[in-house]
């Protein structure tokens, strides 16, 4: 697992990776951002509400 110096560094890495994926897959960057946010929401939901 990668550890980042700050929240800003993590955000920058996430944006860079998303931008790269967007360019290589022809998926809009905004769509990838929404997908990441939804995936994180589901991960939190499963963690705090198992069995849903």
Image: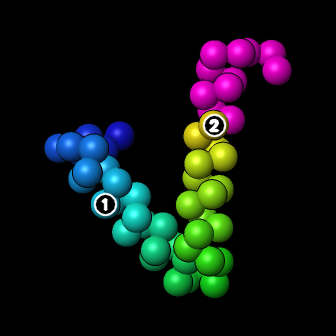
Instruction: Please rate how many residues cluster around mark 1, counting C-alpha atoms within 10 Å: few if below 14, some from 14 to 19, many from 20.
Output: few
Look at the image and name its color scheme: rainbow
Seen in the picture, residue 23 relative to 2 is either above or below; the reply is below
User: Residue beneath label 2, please?
Assistant: 41
What residue is drawn where x is 31% and y is 60%? 12
The residue indicated by pointer 1 is: 12
Is 47 left, or right, of 3 in this rendering?
A: right
Q: Earlier in the sequence, mark 1 or mark 2?
A: 1
> For the residue labelled by badge 1, is the local secondary structure a helix, a strand or a loop?
helix
CA gap between label 1 and label 2 equals: 20 Å
Identity of the residue furthest to the right in this view: 52
How many residues crowd mark 2 within 10 Å: few (<14), some (14–19), many (20+)? few
Magenta residues (range): 42-52
Q: Main structural element of the magenta stretch: helix, strand or loop?
A: helix
Q: Tell me where residue 44 sits by quadrant.
A: top right
Residue for point 69% across, 24% down: 46
- Give SS at disc 2: helix
Residue 13 position within the rendered picture, expressed as x and y whole percent measured from the top left: 33, 59
Quadrant of the image occupied by residue 52: top right
State the residue in front, 36 or 30: 30
**Residue 43 part of the magenta-drawn span:** yes
Residue 17 sits inside the magenta stretch? no
**Left or right of 21 in this view: 7:** left
Where in the figure is residue 39, as x and y percent of width and height? 64, 45
Q: Which is nearer the eye, 33 or 24?
A: 33
Hey, which quadrant is residue 40 in on the image? top right
Q: Is residue 7 above or below residue 33?
A: above
* Rendered-image quadrant of the N terminus: top left
């Amino acid at each position: 697992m990668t550890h980042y110096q700050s929240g800003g560094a993590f955000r920058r890495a996430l944006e860079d990776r998303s931008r790269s994926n967007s360019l290589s897959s022809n998926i809009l960057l905004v769509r990838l951002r929404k997908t990441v946010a939804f995936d994180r929401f589901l991960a939190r939901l499963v963690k705090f509400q198992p069995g849903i």
